[in-house]
Amino acid sequence: MEDVRDLKELQIDALREVANIGAGHAATALSQMTNRRIMISVPQINIARLEEVPDLLGSPQDVVAAVLMHMLGDLTGRTLLLFPEHVARRLCDMLLRRDPGATAAFDAIEQSALKEAGNILSGAYMNALSDSWACCCCRRSPAWWWTCPPRCSRRRI
């Protein structure tokens, strides 16, 4: 199989289009989960080894919540959803029907909510891939991280 890091620009554009479709599906799913209007922007496509991801994320002082999903089937790989701390807290408030600003910690219920959101959002992308390329694409249960980006690939909660 061809190494995904060797894709041509036209192939990356095709991935970007599929990601855009997936983002639309994900926004719809998130809107249904939160009963709120969700706006999306064109997704950014970065193709890198998981070990290289921390270097792509910006400041090492910025704390993020991360949900990692493994993709199996005709396509293999991983999706990594990153939520800046303030976004993760706000999303938990919406998903758990709390007042804005109520999420103070990421305990089991908050982690579960973010993993489920990650599962649904990544699933929307994977379904868009499967539909667009007529292939089988399955996923494993999500893994969760709460850390600064340089440790993202090392510390799992």
Image (cartoon, rainbow, N blue to C red):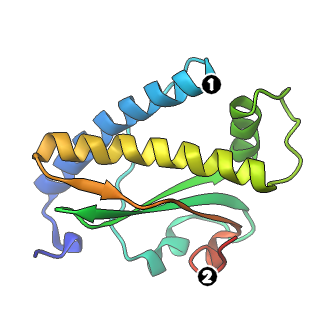
Three-letter code for the amino acid on which mark 2 is drawn: Arg
Query: For the residue labelled by badge 2, is the local secondary structure a helix, a strand or a loop?
Result: loop
Q: Residue at x 22, y 63 (%)?
A: 73
| Circles 2, 1 touching at the beta carbon (< 8 Å) | no
Q: Which mark is residue 94?
A: none
Q: CA distance from mark 2 to mark 1?
A: 31 Å
Instruction: Give, as a three-letter code, the residue at label 1.
Output: Thr
Rendered residue at 52%/59% (across/down): 142
Q: Is residue 41 above or below residue 61?
A: above
Q: Is residue 42 visible?
A: yes
Disc sitting over residue 34 in the figure: 1
Mark 1 Cα shell of 10 Å, populated few (<14), some (14-19), many (≥20): some
- Residue 141, image x, y percentages: 48, 59
On the question of residue 41 being in view, the answer is: no
Left or right of 12 on screen, residue 102: right
Q: Mark 2 sits on what residue?
A: 154
- The residue drawn where x is 11% and y is 52% is 10
Left/right of residue 52 with respect to residue 74 in the rendered view: right
